[in-house]
Image (tube, rainbow, N blue to C red):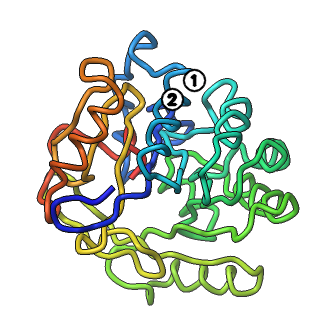
Amino acid sequence: MYDQFNRKINYLRVSVTDRCNLRCVYCMPEEGIKLISHNDILSFEEIIEVIQIAVNLGIDKIRITGGEPLVRKGIVNLVQEISKIQGIKDFGMTTNGILLEDFAEKLANAGLNRINISLDTLNPETFKQITRGGDIQKVLNGIKAAKKAGLMPVKINCVIKESPKEKDAMEVAEFCHKNGLDIRYIHLMELDKGSFSVVEGGEGGNCKTCNRLRLSANGFIMPCLFSDIAFNIRELGIKNAILKAVENKPKCGTSSFNHKFYNIGG
């Protein structure tokens, strides 16, 4: 599939839940959020059907996101079913790593190719502050488990305020270098202010080459993270919603007031 700016659209990010077991300061308010009703959350059958149709239309890269995808009950079964779809060349997941130690081997056996793990600091107290209570040791254990399970390359997503030269970012980079991990620096973004930039060490944030669509946990296909454009698969039908999203994908992101990182997975 090609959009009106001749960008080849072959990447679908799938949010399976808006729920999360952390409350990171740049992602979610301290008091939590109004969660999507269980009745509105896509079933596994719906998610699989969307991915199958998307692959038939030319999508060959799938990434599972959240919220935190590992809090979705039955996530390993979903991964297993997705992995059976012919035509997927790259199948990954983004996680905060808190539950990964228990899931890494199961996910690998189910067919997941690789994983991205969020880690902004190596300081336990700073980590606890950023995540509002998270235990960094669980993330470090999850990283080890991912490597052992062969979910390679393990990529670390490190959020920075201004520069990779920040103390925490440099310490995370050194940790990655010593442990054979890839690091990606993600500048702090604000959806409503249209504040975003290219991911350093990755492909995100470059509007000229953006190849992504997003599926929200409640069934909207979105062509751009920094836009309120969205098409409901239940109202329009899956194929039609996907094609409309490609057709209406903007040349460049602007801002979004309806979407949040916690419900579309960044």
Q: Nearer the viewer, residue 33 or 72?
A: 72
Percent across and percent down for residue 220 are 31, 32
Give the camera-side residue of 8 and 118: 8
Q: Is residue 110 above or below residue 172?
A: above
Residue drawn at 56 percent across, 53 percent down: 94
Residue found at the very far bottom of the displayed protein: 165
Residue at image point 15% right, 48% down: 248
Distance between the alpha carbons at the discs numbered 1 and 2: 5 Å
How many marks do you count on the picture?
2
Left or right of 87 on screen, residue 229: left
Percent across and percent down for residue 108 are 80, 50
Q: Which residue is mark 2?
A: 47
User: What amino acid does circle 2 point to?
Assistant: Ile
Do residues under tags 1 and 2 come within 8 Å of each other at their CB atoms?
A: yes
Q: Which residue is mark 1?
A: 44
The label number, if any, that marks residue 78 in the structure image = none
Residue drawn at point x = 44 percent, y = 85 percent: 164
Badge 1 marks a residue whose secondary structure is helix
Residue 262, position as x, y percentages in the image:
39, 41
Choose between 161 and 217: the one closer to the eye. Answer: 217
Crowding at mark 2 (Cα within 10 Å: few <14, some 14-19, many 20+):
many
**Image quadrant where residue 64 sits:** top right
The percent coordinates of residue 265 (x first, y second) are 42, 47
Q: What's the amino acid at mark 1?
A: Phe
53 vs 75, nearest the viewer: 53
Circle 2: element type? helix
The reply, left or right, for residue 45 in relation to residue 248 is: right
Rate crowding at label 1 as few (under 14), some (14 to 19) or many (20 or more) other CA atoms within 10 Å: some
154 lies left or right of 34: right
Q: Quadrant of residue 206?
A: bottom left
